Amino acid sequence: MLFYDFEVFSHDWLVVIMDTRNRETTVIVNDPGKLEAFYKANQREIWVGFNSRHYDQYILKAILCGFPPKKVNDYIIVRGLPGWKFSSLFNQFPLNNYDVMTNIDRGLKFFEGSMGNDIRESEVPFDIDRPLTPEEIEQTIFYCKHDVSQTMEVFVKRKEDFEAHMGLVKIACQGKPLNLSLIGKTKPQLSAIILDATRKDYDDEFDIDFPYSMQIEKYRAVIDWYSDPGNRCYSKMINGRKKKVQLEMNVAGVPHVFGWGGVHGAIPQYHGKGYFINMDVASLYPSLMIKYNLHSRSMSNPAKYVEIYKQRLEYKKAGNPLQLPLKLVLNSTYGVMKDKNNALYDPLQANRVCVYGQLLILDLIEHLEPYAQIIQSNTDGVLVRMPDGKDESAWYSLIDDVAFEWEQRTGLQLEFDEYREVFQKDVNNYIIIPSGPLHDEKGKPRWKSKGAYVKKLSSLDYGDFPIINRALNEYMIRGVPIRRTIRECDRLIEFQLVSKISGKYSCIMHGNKRLKEKCIRVFASLDPADAGVQKIHAVKNRPAKISNSPEHCFICNEDISAAAVPAKLDREWYINLANKRLADFGVI
């Protein structure tokens, strides 16, 4: 396995390649012949990069084709065009390319910052319009090596994702020799291959119908809304502004939103104790596709989807790791039915799945409403509270009867979980505390959380004031005072805000100082001489405060993975922010 990264300038290019098997590092600078020889010797290897699907692999192929790499760089970066469109000659150089980056990532530097690693950048500007000096070449190599090693670290932390991806490749090749070039496909693309889909065009995107099993009386206004041809579009221009087409209405005393992406409803700023039941529909979208024949019409054999569904359940029961790639096939099918570039494209079926799901959840809410308080509803479930707040009551059997009847009628299955306390900012931000122990027998947390304020953090997602997340969780789950959590923490990394500006901005300013970095790590400071940070718009040249950043802050872009908190860290700033966020949950 090879990890690689290209750097391209107007007159120079270089690549760093790290071979994990032989533990060798190869650096090639402005030498197409050496690169071609290396490529030919390692063509069958898996080449791993960060954003290599969209960038690095095309720089490699451009050099092998004899094209100026700077021309391809600008085609991709400046003009924003896909690299594969530059030349059909790229097809002469196949590459088993695996990209560590996903489409929701904020960039390698953000990951480096989250892990507490050094995020200082080279002082060699990429827009320099002359050949680099030997010193500049060496500095660029140093930082390129750093980025490749960081890509390796991200890969290790995402090893399960790679294994699932390889699982999809193996499934796609069942009955045939293993084709490693498929590793360059995205998971949705592999799903389309596995399901034998053929790209087709459709002109019936909004010719929706409704599930035959639904029984909705009180809230028929929702059905009427979907029936109105005027609502069968995704957005409209209203008062000169483009707005989503959606229905906002009160359901069971809770504000709800219906539309073309899933139902959402929650009591805002709610905190309650008692006996709560969370009812989630097991595998809602795959189950709807199978039960109501809502699969993509581009599949050559829909029965294969059912086979994969059943196989996945068997694998899951047996603890077979292949259950994960099968789950990816099942769950990704809905999303890609609106992707015009995917062979599973079928927007009508995607809309039918979405509408069927929303109406059947509404059906469940309507039948539960007389017997329980609705706290929250989402795409695939409902959270309710017993009227008397007790777990041993006649209400439970009534709710259970409603759920059973709904399951029998709709053909869907509900999974019950019991909770004792709810902290809810809105439908997208909450913590639900379970009845009984906080962890299961394997040590896995049993509480349920969602949202940026309280979500479970990983080392790759540790750049948005992790101490605030920790303080809120400790308070809501264990009753630990906010001040205590923040005062007792002495790890600097816990207090970091890692911020990376997009291409819309030319630079970051710290007070009057222009920074060379596009990604920085900031901390609240007690020193009034420490200025705030702003980003400068590339076109309008206007400054804008970096979101969530303190008014007074110090910057530390060096490695802080083992650093202690300095005396000038403003702990009160973090305490105030944590209390403000706690108030958003209706607690204070």
Image (cartoon, rainbow, N blue to C red):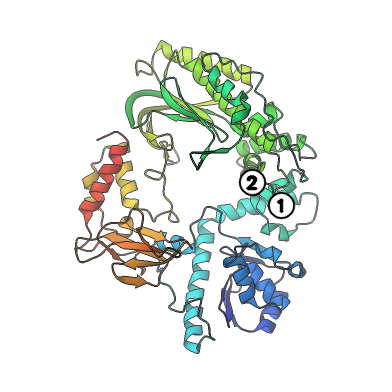
Residue type at numbered disc 2: Pro
Mark carried by residue 170: 1
Image quarter where the C terminus lies is: top left
Q: Is residue 48 visible?
A: yes
Rendered position, 483 above or below 28: above
Local SS, label 2 = helix
Relative depth, front residue between 564 and 94 = 94
Residue at 67% x, 19% y: name it.
212
Place of residue 48 in the rendered image (x, y in percent of width and height, measured from the top left): 60, 65
- Seen in the image, is 433 located left or right of residue 37? left
Local SS, label 1 = helix
Residue at 20% x, 52% y: name it.
572
Image quarter where the N terminus lies is: bottom right
Residue neighbourhood size for the residue with mark 1, other residues' Cα within 10 Å, grouped as few (<14), some (14–19), many (≥20):
many
Rendered position, 444 above or below 540: above
- Seen in the image, is 161 located left or right of residue 524? right
Mark carried by residue 306: none
Q: On the image, which quarter does residue 509 sit in?
A: bottom left
Q: CA distance from mark 2 to mark 1?
A: 10 Å
Place of residue 197 in the rendered image (x, y in percent of width and height, measured from the top left): 76, 44
Residue carrying label 2 = 325
The answer to which of marks 2 and 1 sits earlier in the sequence is: 1
Residue neighbourhood size for the residue with mark 2, other residues' Cα within 10 Å, grouped as few (<14), some (14–19), many (≥20):
many
Q: Are marks 2 and 1 in contact (CB under 8 Å)?
A: yes
Place of residue 229 in the rendered image (x, y in percent of width and height, measured from the top left): 63, 28
Residue type at numbered disc 1: Lys
Q: Is residue 21 visible?
A: no
Rendered position, 541 above or below 377: below
Q: On the image, which quarter does residue 507 sit in?
A: bottom left
